[in-house]
Amino acid sequence: LVRMLADYSIQVFGTQHVPTEEDVQFLFNLCDHGGNGKTDGDGAIDRREVMAVCEAWSDFVGQKQMLGELVKTYDQDANDSIDKDELQTILRETSGMDVPLQVVIWIFEQADVSGNGLLSIMELARALVACELWKAGSTPHAPAQLVKSKSLAQGLDVAPDLPQPRSGICAIL
């Protein structure tokens, strides 16, 4: 999978982007978790899921520099990951409004694919997509102009009990 994604990035971006072990685990968990109609959760990546992995990797690589800058700017404890408090600050700064704590927690839980209580750079990309969906009051089936990174939005459904956004666009994706 590492070699395939590195080769794929050469084809798409003209330069090689080699995924880390953490990147591969995120992509695997994202694309083989079952229950979203596209994956089966069988512990293996089949042909259909390979396409989802490639799409998510492409979305991530296209935004990697911007995401890295966000981590560099807002990672207060310098552990190269984002905790809930840091995420709340990122969401407030990128949206220009206070995002309710209930929404921050929902976004964090949706993005923390690894389940370790911290967001990696790839999980931060998913968090920004989740915020974008919340702001749009939508699901991953939203019109393309609302959700640019549909592959990172797999399995996200905006909880109906979340406070409604007041205005604006949340993420900078």
Image (cartoon, helix red, strand yellow):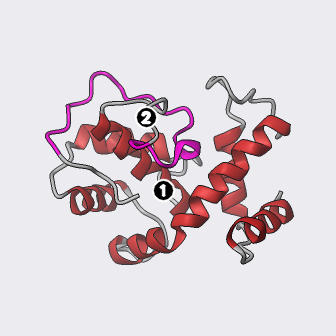
Residue ID at (48%, 46%): 111
Residue ID at (33%, 71%): 74
Quadrant containing the C terminus is bottom left
Q: Secondary structure at mark 2?
A: loop
Q: Is residue 65 left or right of residue 23?
A: left
**How far apart in space, not on screen, are marks 1 and 2 (Cα)?**
19 Å
Quadrant containing the N terminus is bottom right
What type of secondary structure mainly makes up the magenta span? loop
In the image, is residue 62 above or below residue 131? below
Residue ID at (57%, 36%): 154
Marking on residue 125: 1
Q: Secondary structure at mark 1?
A: helix
Residues 74 and 67: in front is 67
In reply to whether residue 159 is colored magenta, the answer given is yes
Residue 90 x, y percent position in the rendering = 30, 61
In the image, is residue 109 above or below residue 5? above
Residue 6 x, y percent position in the rendering = 78, 68
Q: Is residue 154 left or right of residue 34?
A: left
Q: Which residue is mark 2?
A: 143
Check disc 2: other Cα within 10 Å, few if <14, some if 14-19, many if 20+.
Answer: few
In reply to whether residue 24 is colored magenta, the answer given is no
Badge 2 amino acid: Pro
Specify the segment rendered in magenta.
145-167
